[in-house]
């Protein structure tokens, strides 16, 4: 197969009609029509083999995850996803790889009504780049700089499963290698098929003060909110929400380390005044999704993880940093 055949294969798999796509895949550029009363939220994230995913990941999961991490950024802005671009670099032409990859991408794109409108396909080390565009009412995007002293800090879903899933794949002899298949599968699924909290992000508009999605690790990512907002943040380690699989998988110290610093969660962390948080919790409960209060915004700077007696827990590393 040639470059054009792959593009056609991806286009066929990801066909989704949107009235705001005037001209999609096939010309030198896509022509798109954003709603006149909306701001455009744009974000891009790339996944590189050996850095963001292991060589053995299923192509379906890779297609899913490449879009999921990008939709997670739109979720953190409170934006409604609309369009995506895909750049795919592969070492050799592989029809079945592209078929499964496009199927995973298309499954999540369809669920969020995202149209794939263009991209680029080249030969090289396996890597995937996705750019997403979404809409947000003017002046109402969720940002990192809106945290205020006295706000509570919340997180959606549960934390630490994806990082524990990574341990399951890396650990050949230790405790993670001895887990039951059910527990391992549940943890690895959270690593490979993150669910971007897109609806929750939209619910949080005008309710959350600041919001971020957790990719590098809770403490590291909350550090961005603290810095951009000019505040400090205290997190109660005992309040961090954990799944049954994670509770079964490790001791408390390991669990807290994975939850606080493991990353790849793609949950939303946000701050809200207590009255706004009540409104947000009710709105989220209606959509079947909740959030857990895990700490508070304080005067000062930085993020501190506290134990049950209020003492700071020292962390070996605070999260992912590519150039550390
Ligand atoms: P050009 O040489 O003008 O860059 P290409 O041959 O690279 O054009 O691409 C042809 C069309 O296919 C363009 O509309 C481009 O956006 C689209 N395209 C290429 N690769 C992908 C891909 N991986 N996913 C989606 N669309 C793609
Ligand atoms: Mg091109």
Image (cartoon, grey):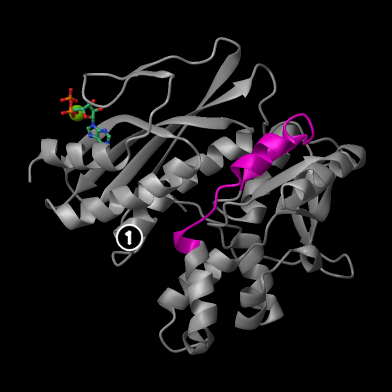
Please give left or right for residue 223 compared with residue 187 in the image. Answer: right
Q: Residue at x 69, y 68 (%)?
A: 242
Q: Which corner quadrant of the image does residue 275 belong to?
A: top right
Q: Which residue lies furthest to the left in this view?
A: 1
List x then y, in percent, for residue 85.
35, 32
Per the image, is 215 magenta?
A: no
Does residue 246 appear in the picture of this structure? Answer: yes
Please give left or right for residue 12 compared with residue 43 in the image. Answer: left
Q: Residue at x 43, y 20 (%)?
A: 19
Tell me the SS state at disc 1.
loop
Please determine whether, in this image, residue 29 is positioned above or below residue 75.
above
| Label 1 CB less than 8 angstroms from ligand 1 | no
Q: Quadrant of ligand 2?
A: top left
List x then y, in percent, for residue 283.
79, 42
Magenta span of residues: 191-213
Q: Residue at x 72, y 52 (%)?
A: 288
Please determine whether, in this image, residue 32 is positioned above or below residue 300.
above
Q: Residue at x 37, y 45 (%)?
A: 106
List x then y, in percent, for residue 207.
79, 34
Q: Which of 238 and 120 is in front in this view?
A: 120
Q: Which residue bears the numbered disc 1?
A: 50
Per the image, is 194 magenta?
A: yes
Q: Nearer the viewer, residue 209 or 102?
A: 102
Q: Which residue lies furthest to the top in this view?
A: 36
Does residue 299 appear in the picture of this structure? Answer: no
Q: Residues within 10 Å of mark 1 (few under 14, many from 20)?
A: few
Please determine whether, in this image, residue 217 is positioned above or below residue 182.
above
Please determine whether, in this image, residue 24 is positioned above or below residue 37.
below
List x then y, in percent, for residue 94.
14, 54
Please give left or right for residue 40 compared with residue 270 in the image. Answer: left
Q: Nearer the viewer, residue 50 or 4?
A: 4
């Amino acid at each position: 197969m040639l470059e054009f055949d792959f593009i056609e294969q991806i286009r066929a798999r990801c066909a989704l009609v949107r009235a705001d796509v005037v001209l999609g895949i096939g010309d030198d550029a896509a022509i798109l029509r954003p709603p006149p009363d909306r701001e455009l939220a744009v974000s891009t994230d790339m996944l590189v083999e050996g850095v963001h995913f292991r060589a053995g990941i299923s192509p379906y999961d890779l297609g899913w995850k490449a879009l999921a991490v990008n939709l997670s950024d739109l979720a953190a802005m409170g934006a409604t996803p609309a369009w995506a671009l895909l750049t795919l670099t592969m070492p050799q032409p592989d029809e079945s790889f592209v078929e499964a990859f496009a199927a995973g991408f298309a499954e999540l794109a369809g669920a969020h009504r995202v149209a794939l409108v263009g991209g680029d396909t080249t030969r090289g080390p396996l890597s995937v780049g996705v750019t997403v565009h979404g809409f947000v009412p003017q002046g109402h995007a969720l940002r990192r700089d809106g945290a205020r002293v006295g706000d509570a800090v919340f997180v959606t879903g549960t934390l630490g499963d994806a990082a524990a899933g990574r341990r399951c794949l890396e650990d050949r002899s230790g405790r993670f290698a001895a887990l039951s298949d059910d527990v391992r599968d549940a943890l690895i699924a959270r690593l490979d098929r993150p669910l971007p909290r897109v609806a929750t992000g939209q619910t949080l508009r005008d309710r959350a003060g600041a919001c971020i999605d957790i990719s590098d690790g809770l403490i590291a990512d909350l550090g961005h909110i603290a810095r951009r907002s000019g505040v400090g943040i205290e997190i109660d380690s005992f309040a961090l929400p954990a799944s049954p699989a994670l509770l079964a998988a490790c001791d408390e110290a390991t669990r807290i380390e994975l939850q606080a610093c493991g990353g790849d969660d793609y949950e939303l962390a946000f701050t809200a005044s207590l009255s706004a948080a009540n409104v947000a919790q009710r709105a989220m409960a209606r959509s079947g999704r909740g959030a857990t209060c895990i700490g508070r915004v304080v005067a000062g700077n930085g993020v501190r993880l506290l134990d049950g007696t209020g003492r700071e827990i020292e962390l070996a590393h605070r999260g992912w940093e590519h150039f550390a």
